[in-house]
Amino acid sequence: MTRPRKKSNSGLPSNLYFDIRRKTYRYRRATDGKWYPFGTDRLKAIDAAKQLNLEYMKGRDLVALVMGESTMTLAAYIEQYRTTILPKRELKKGTLDLYAVHFRKINKALGQKPINEITVRIVADFLRDSTPRSSNQVRALLMNVFTHAIADGLIPDNPAASTIAQKEKKKRKRHTQEGLKAIRDASPQWLKNAIDLALLTALRRGDVLEMRFDKMEDGFLSVIQEKTSEEADTAWIKYELTPELLKVIEQCRDDVDSPFLVHRKPERMHATEHKEHWSKVERRYLTRAFQEAREAAGCYAGWTKEELPGFHEIRAVSVKLYTRSGEDAQKIAGHATAEMTKNYLRDEEDVTWTKVSPNLDITKITE
């Protein structure tokens, strides 16, 4: 991986630098390292640098032609990026799965194009066909891919970085109690269990799916909450085994020998070889199952696809119900606190566990 550019040079094309002391721009010719003054006009300096970089890249293409080298396609470079660069970033499985979806979409539209022929216009047109959220996710991924391609000498500039991120306007609505009850009634038992646990604990989808029977000890169920990348800590929570929680846990017990509270017997066992346990429910599968149950329930008539709430929005219902009942919703949900930031530096046996009592009455939804 290349060394990050200084803040003063961020956003500038390759080989163009800003001299903070003189308040001017200068260009470094890649062939011999010679410096050229480019004045104080930022736009003119950027335009000139891009033209020069392009000319040098054209020369590189001619050399490659004489030497019999083939131009690498975007799909080929993405495969190189996926196998050699992504493993070093040690990303979570959920992130890698999302990247895989984005890569398939990118390769389908742009994969066969030579990477050095992909322009800002091509990327902008491609991103325009997606929703703002998906477009921004793909844009960020492409920016990183092209950054590494620059470092490998394949392209002079980053075409994705020159596009503008779309403004994301949240359209998804909240669940109503009546709507969530209808969805739960239309769900298979394992999904009902997941919904009930989400209501009682206000946990996210991934955390609900990680809850285990063997984490019950001394009257508590322990959960190490996985936070998103925007948040600063990992929440270590002990949920008191209240009558309400015990009822749902017993509801989770069946004839399937699984360590996970939320589990199911898959239709095809050979598809489970990469799972931690064959009975574990994957996040994307839960999302699809919840969407199918929501469709079968026929609730939220007239709402657009963008407005329909998913499994994640159960968290908002839980927090709202706890607040109404006079409980500390922030504590129940395991929201970030200054004290919990210290947990990154501790071993599991040394962390500060937050003890909460999931005692919410959810019978209006579950019965």
Image: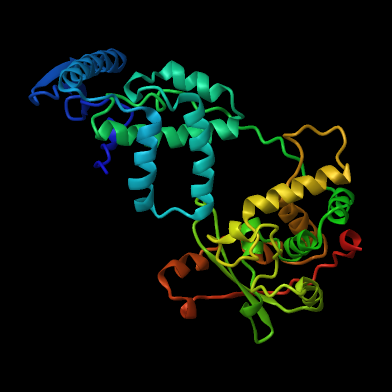
Q: How many marks?
A: 0
Q: Estimate the x, y position of residue 30 in percent, counting from the top left.
A: 14, 25
Q: Which of the pair 191/11 is nearer the observer?
A: 191
Q: Residue at x 45, y 68 (%)?
A: 342
Residue 296 vertical placement versus 159 (above, below):
below
Figure colour scheme: rainbow
Q: Residue at x 28, y 25 (%)?
A: 155
State the image quarter where residue 135 is shown: top right
- Image quadrant where one finds the C terminus: bottom right
Q: Is residue 85 visible?
A: no
Q: Which of the pair 344/342 is nearer the observer?
A: 344
Q: Image check: 109 left or right of 366?
A: left
Q: Which of the pair 141/11 is nearer the observer?
A: 141
Q: Image check: 220 left or right of 139?
A: right
Residue 32 vertical placement versus 215 (above, below):
above
Q: Residue at x 19, y 20 (%)?
A: 60
State the image quarter where residue 76 is shown: top left
Q: Residue at x 50, y 61 (%)?
A: 233
Q: Estimate the x, y position of residue 73 in percent, counting from the top left.
A: 36, 27
Q: Image check: 359 left or right of 221?
A: right
Q: Estimate the x, y position of residue 314 in percent, counting from the top left.
A: 75, 54
Q: Is residue 224 visible?
A: yes
- Image quadrant where one finds the N terminus: top left
Q: Estimate the x, y position of residue 8 in percent, counting from the top left.
A: 27, 32
